[in-house]
Amino acid sequence: MVQQVRRASTGKGAYALSEKRETTRAQNREKIEAAAWTIFSTIGLDAASVRDIVAESQVSPGSFYNYYGSKEAVFDEIVDRLIRRIREETAAARAGAGDFEVMLFEAYLAFMNLILPMKGGAAFFELNQHHIRSRLFGATQIEAMLLDIETDVGERIEIDRLSPIKRHILISVLFASGTEAIFAAFRSGVYDAGDLAGFLTRLFTPGIVSAVHPDLAKLHE
């Protein structure tokens, strides 16, 4: 009986130790990522060093290398988390929209409202834009997001009338235009999410509708 109690007690202790260790790991990763965001938003990925991130995070160099092998690995994690949030929030915005034009506006607005207010966001995107661009296209998360967009657009307008290559161009342009609008907004210092979302919606809606329904476009000539 004593041995059983001792084994149970030991098991609980091991579980508590393991839980504490996982909490510490999570906290250290959060510190490292927060510090990396600050450093990347201040001097950029190219000029940054692991030493800079470690000093800002106050986590030991050994702990840093336990979680990340390089500064690029932390950067990739930050960008990956950002892409996941963009995918989730723009998908939720599209889901609540009735027609194509409203869907386009709400998705752009959700995207702008997520990115533009971020503390340090302007500097992060400006200093690291070539790295961000290189990681966006071809990334698994982005490909999944483009499929989500294609499905949602297809439920509101007959894009299946277009060839596969034209559908791919259409969806890629919709995503890329939002990204380029973010870069332009940060460069100019103009952060009006509603105005940007409205501009992109007005810019693309008539062209997409006429591309999908050229017969309707001819009737209005």
Image (tube, rainbow, N blue to C red):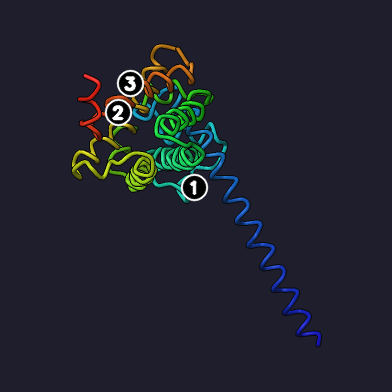
Q: Quadrant of residue 104?
A: top left
Label 2 sits on residue: 130
Label 3 sits on residue: 203
Q: Is residue 39 left or right of residue 25?
A: left
Q: Nearer the viewer, mark 3 or mark 1?
A: 3
Residue 150, horizontal then vertical, whole percent: 33, 43
Residue 147, horizontal then vertical, whole percent: 34, 46
User: How busy is the neighbourhood of tag 3: few (under 14 within 10 Å), some, or many (20 plus)?
Assistant: few
Residue that appears at 26% across and 45% down: 160
Label 1 sits on residue: 62
Q: Amino acid at mark 2?
A: His
Distance of label 2 from label 3 (alpha carbons): 26 Å
User: How busy is the neighbourhood of tag 1: few (under 14 within 10 Å), some, or many (20 plus)?
Assistant: few
**Is disc 3 placed on a helix, strand or loop?**
helix
User: How busy is the neighbourhood of tag 2: few (under 14 within 10 Å), some, or many (20 plus)?
Assistant: few
Residue that appears at 46% across and 26% down: 112
Residue that appears at 42% across and 42% down: 80
Q: Nearer the viewer, mark 1 or mark 2?
A: 2
- Asked whether residue 81 is in view, the answer is no
Q: Amino acid at mark 3?
A: Leu
Q: Nearer the viewer, mark 2 or mark 3?
A: 3
Residue that appears at 30% across and 28% down: 130
Q: Is residue 58 left or right of residue 208?
A: right
Residue 184, horizontal then vertical, whole percent: 36, 17
